[in-house]
Amino acid sequence: MKRIIALIIVVIPGALAAFGIKLMRDMTFGIYQSPFPYLWLQFLVGLLLFVGGLGFVAGFILHRDRKRSKVQNRFKR
């Protein structure tokens, strides 16, 4: 059960990051998405989703590896 919850915790921000990439790609090709009236706003929201999702997944993996002592000395506290 713990592994399923951990997988869900990682998949949801990963999906948000993928959606952020899609929004940025659509802005590059000039495709408007429905809730965004401007392309620059669409790109900004996509960038925030991507950075937030990627940061969460990276932090989750770093936290897990710190607990298991599998990180280099510079990442240890």
Image (cartoon, grey):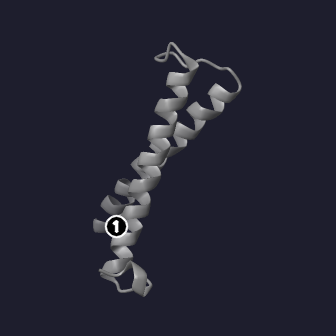
Residue type for callout 1: Arg
Q: Is residue 62 left or right of residue 17?
A: left
Indicate the position of residue 3 as horizontal and vertical percent values: 34, 67
Pick the residue in front: 58 or 2. 58
Q: Which residue is mark 1?
A: 3
Q: Is residue 18 left or right of residue 4?
A: right
Label 1 neighbourhood size at 10 Å, few (<14), some (14-19), many (20+)? Answer: few
Measured along the vertical axis of the image, is residue 62 above or below residue 26? below
Q: Quadrant of residue 58?
A: bottom left
Q: Is residue 38 above or below residue 45?
A: above
Q: Residue furthest front?
A: 74
Question: Which residue is found at the position 35% from the left and 73% from the top?
Answer: 64
Where disc 1 sits, the SS reads helix
- In the displayed structure, would residue 5 be above or below residue 77? above
Q: Quadrant of the C terminus?
A: bottom left
Q: Position of residue 44 (x, y in %)?
A: 50, 31
Residue 44 appears left or right of 65: right
Number of numbered discs: 1
